[in-house]
Amino acid sequence: MPAPHRNTKDISLSITTFIIISIIKSVAVVGVLLTAVAYSVWLERKVSAHIQNRWGPTRVGPFGLLQPLADGAKFIFKEDLTQPHVYKPLYIAAPIISLVFAITSISVIPFGNWVDIGPWGTYLQITDLNIGLLVVLGITSMGVYGVALAGWSSNSKYSLLGGLRASAQMVSYEVSLGLSLVGVLIMAGSLSLRDIVDAQGGVFWGFIPRWNIFHGQTLAFFIYLISAYAETNRTPFDLPEAESELVAGYHTEYSAMKFAMFFMAEYANMVTVACLATLMFLGGWHGPIFGPPILQAAMPVFWFCLKVFFFMFLYVWVRWTLPRFRYDQLMAFGWKVLLPLAVANIVYTALVVAWRA
Amino acid sequence: MFHLILFLFFGAICVAGAINLLVQSHPINSALSLIVVMGSLAAEYLLLGAEFLAAVQVIVYAGAIMVLFLITIMLLNAGKEERTKGSRVATLLGVPGVVIGAVLVAWTLLHRSNLQSVPIGALKGDPSDIARLLFHDFLLPFEVTSVLILIAIMGAVVLASRPEAVARGPRKDEG
């Protein structure tokens, strides 16, 4: 059933135009994503440095802005060691699996509204599915395999422990992550990310935006945020790569570009999770729009990027502020605190929606 | 036409994965083959028009259940299986038996049943359709199944916990 408020434009393109537009969109989105990944590493280094009263990268380019390029060149030219004791097929496949699923999940994320380019027009999104949210969750859930297989195929105890921790943690927190989104789904009545954002337009009392975070889903937002940190293996839940006990966790035995692929996958997952938080709780591309027409067309994308940037900054901020959990605390917190809270939020939201109907 | 080609392609991958699952001697490779089977089944559902089912197939089976399989194999560090000859009687009777069974099922479905064939992509698999079936038309069986699963979970917890832990109540020293 298409949702009643769905603002579908009549897309009657010839198949060739459709394919060309799709290819252009895919290349643009993946390009932007990879650039964002590279610069979130720069952001992480810079912000962490300032938090610790250091300078961070300053030598390569102004403010060290060319540092990601230097890092990339270094990763490519480093010697790629393959230990003799690894199980080779999976050892090579694991980083590829991680990176492919991390990048694929961006494909259904909408960045903005309809734009007209000459005779054609398109939504700022690679493709709009009416099960968009489930696609994102499904693809991110497949990303566990990269980490788990990396840990196992390296044939080293640190890697194995890291892989086991990562897979147990990601499976556990995926439950509360998924359930925290159900409240939003009940309110929007659709699984399409575009519909969910459209349902958050408008304001309360003239100034508070009707975003889900201000619309009864505040608890769900925080459950989502915490679970997302655990899903992406970030501090305070970075047990899988706890350097003080596991050397580097699941990617201990990796070097050069294979290691860089895990690194890129982690940051790409962070971007996806930040995009999803923006869409589900912060109203996606909604925000004040003003100025000349050309500016008005660009504003939604600007607001979207600003919100995603806020989440990326928050990631870094939290990482350099909080210490690491103990593993049993992590599991107990996920199953005994977050899960009941998420279920309670679903019941509460369902009751409110049923009451109003 | 394009749909049909994709459908056959994923069908072939599915069957190849299933055969590989049996042929591989290492449990990890077998588990990965099963994931390929699940994934290509999801693609088949998607091509038939059952989008929701496809997504759930990936999230639940490929993304959650198979991860647990993999964790178990990794934890036990299961090594290569030993090849056994197997009994000759089983081979002699089993292979023709499977072929005859498959032919019988296919023939019955094609000729002896009044099932209508559905064009590819015409299946109704929207989340709302499935929700109406589960929470309206078949509410009682659905709820009974969920109670059954709950009982199974509780049984698993009781079986997995150590006897002294049950007697003493929840442990304080580990989570």
Image: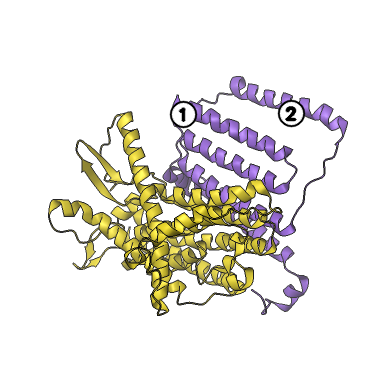
Chain colours: A yellow, B purple
The type of residue carrying mark 1 is His
Residue drawn 42% across the image and 79% down it: A52
| Residue A61 locus on image (x, y percent) | 34, 63
The subunit letter for the residue under badge 1 reads: B
Quadrant that contains the N terminus of chain B: top left
Q: Is residue B140 visible?
A: no
In this rendering, position of residue A37 left or right of residue B98: left
Q: Secondary structure at mark 1?
A: helix
In the picture, residue A165 is in which quadrant?
bottom right
In this rendering, position of residue A229 left or right of residue A244: left
In this rendering, position of residue A284 left or right of residue B115: left
- The disc at residue B3 is 1
Q: Residues within 10 Å of mark 1 (few under 14, many from 20)?
A: few
Q: Is residue B13 visible?
A: yes
Residue drawn 59% across the image and 34% down it: B13
Tell which of A6 and A309 is nearer to you: A309
